[in-house]
Amino acid sequence: MNPSLSIYDNLGGEKGVRALVEAFYPIVQQNEQLAPLFPEDIQPVIDKQYMFLSQFLEDQGCFPRRLDTR
């Protein structure tokens, strides 16, 4: 880990954060206690979690710019 970079950049930027989220949610779907808490079509959840983490970890505003809040 490079302390001069953001966590976002240390994770590999867009590709790294996307890979992290896409690896996590299939595990959630296989868990009998967690799976019922999520919709069967998990892709929208993955997309929103990616946007949230990107902004939280320092991609300056990706979440509000891309999220349809209707």
Image (cartoon, helix red, strand yellow):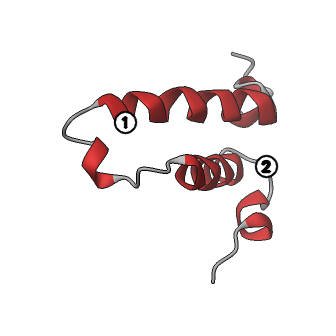
Count residues near mark 2 (Cα–Cα under 10 Å), then give few for <14, some for 14-19, many for 20+. Answer: some
The quarter of the picture where the N terminus appears is: top right
Please give the label number shown on residue 59: 2
Residue 8 coordinates in the image, percent (x, y): 72, 35
Q: Is residue 24 left or right of residue 10?
A: left
Rendered view: 39 above or below 64: above
Q: Residue at x 73, y 69 (%)?
A: 64
| Kind of residue sitting beneath label 2 | Asp
Residue at the limit of the structure toward the bottom, as seen here: 70
Q: Residue at x 26, y 42 (%)?
A: 34
Rendered view: 68 above or below 66: below
Looking at the picture, tell me which residue is in the foreground, 36 or 60. Answer: 36
Residue 61 coordinates in the image, percent (x, y): 78, 62
| Kind of residue sitting beneath label 1 | Gln
Q: What residue is pinned by disc 1?
A: 29
Q: Residue at x 77, y 25 (%)?
A: 12
| Label 2 secondary element | loop
Residue 14 coordinates in the image, percent (x, y): 79, 36
Residue 31 coordinates in the image, percent (x, y): 27, 32
Looking at the picture, tell me which residue is in the foreground, 9 or 35. Answer: 35
Rendered view: 7 above or below 68: above
Question: What's the distance in space between the residues labelled 2 and 1, CA to CA?
Answer: 27 Å
Q: Residue at x 80, y 68 (%)?
A: 65
Q: Is residue 62 left or right of residue 24?
A: right
